[in-house]
Image (cartoon, grey):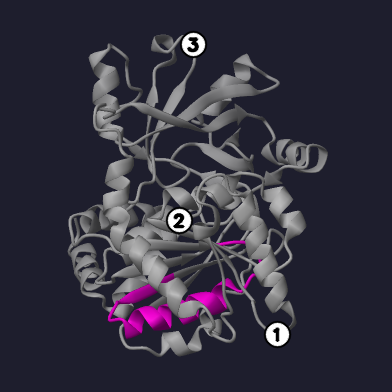
Amino acid sequence: MSGQIEILAEGVLAGDRRSLARALTLVESERGVDRDAARALIERLREGSGPATRIGITGPPGAGKSTLIEQLGLRFVEAGKRVCVLAVDPTSSRTGGSILGDKTRMTELARKAGVFIRPSPTGDGSGALSGRTREALTVLGSGPFDYLLLETAGSGQADTEVANLVDVLVLVLAPGGGDELQGMKRGIRELADLIVVNKADGETRQLARSTASDYARSLPAAGRDAVVSCSALEGTGLDELARRIADLADSAPARQAGEQAPDRDASGAIGRLNHVALATADVEQAAAFYRDVLGAEVSEPKPLPEHGVTTVFVRLPNTALELLEPLGEESPISGFLKRATSGGMHHICCEVDDILAARDRVREQGVRILGDGEPSIGAHGLPVLFLHPKDCFGVLIELEERASVGSGE
């Protein structure tokens, strides 16, 4: 580890604002030269202090998330808590630009001593998070903060991925969202610890209360106890909401420990399907098919020179497709396309909690690991390994370490 990385890590752990900003810029960078430095920084920060409690604030655009976060943050500060905010802002798929205006809507909170607020672009213009949100959370969670508030870009159902990154998930909705309730079905609203119907003020006061009752009746288990209404504008209901979120945050470690199965050692066991990778000679043409013909949500092409591919992710409600185009003369996809000229399934990616434990587990069963057996960093910025297809019934299997709250990733 270089001396500069050590100095930067010490600044982050101490909560130095300049160090936090520099570290976030580093881990959000897509430059190849920065990725090794970012990886070294993340590894160093994992050795530091325990992570802050992560509180996810998600929901559709226009629900008033930024205003609500500022008001909650002010109450947490008054209660003696140290607060930081990571606000993910949508990036235009046409221009590649982001407004990054969330911080400007939290001016009062930003003036409080010890509070740190960081806007972050989604990068590819799709989804509720950026490709580097996990690493950004590791940086901020390593600082001397009690609560880390994560505001998503608010893309709706895709926000389910946020649940894996936070200790407490709060879903914020606007009054009168009948069609929205139908569209959300079961996904995000069943994962939320609290559903908050905001804007219970003025002419929408009664509508907000009625909407909260509708959501409460739609929940299968938690019911009314998990749904509240409030007004971030007038401040009504916020003291009680802040108290309930603080209670959930403080009890998160015990609740998560209780949810784990004590009688099963799942170290290295396979988890959910992360994505299916499809090789193609023309990634833009393939992306257009999924976007324009099938109506899927598609990311912008992203070159990964270290892996010899250009990737595009097709986001589906329950998983994703990764489109792979050869990049460079040594691309492993080139050889695949020589055998399957029309393209086809290249590999599947499954998540594991611990990549090294998974490696040791499969090795004990005689499964070979491609390469030198050491994890590399994949398209999501997380450690990955590939299992030899001849040992996996002809299927190339990628194992990706799951983003988890406990590890800071």
Evaluate whether residue 214 shows in this view.
yes
100 relative to 365, above or below: below
Helix, strand or loop for disc 3: loop
Query: Which badge, 2 or 1, comes first in the chain's sequence?
Result: 2
Instruction: Indicate the amino acid at tag 3.
Output: Gly
Q: Are marks 3 and 1 in contact (CB under 8 Å)?
A: no
Asked whether 300 falls inside the magenta stretch, the response is no
Residue tagged 3: 394
Displayed quadrant of residue 46: bottom left
Residue at 58% across / 87% down in the picture?
Answer: 234
Residue tagged 2: 132
Helix, strand or loop for disc 2: loop
Q: Which residues are magenta?
A: 58-85
Helix, strand or loop for disc 1: helix
Displayed quadrant of residue 373: top left
Q: Nearer the viewer, mark 2 or mark 1?
A: 1
Foreground residue among 400 and 305: 400
Q: Quadrant of the N terminus?
A: bottom left
81 relative to 344 in the view: left or right: left
Q: Nearer the viewer, mark 3 or mark 1?
A: 1
65 relative to 370 in the view: left or right: right
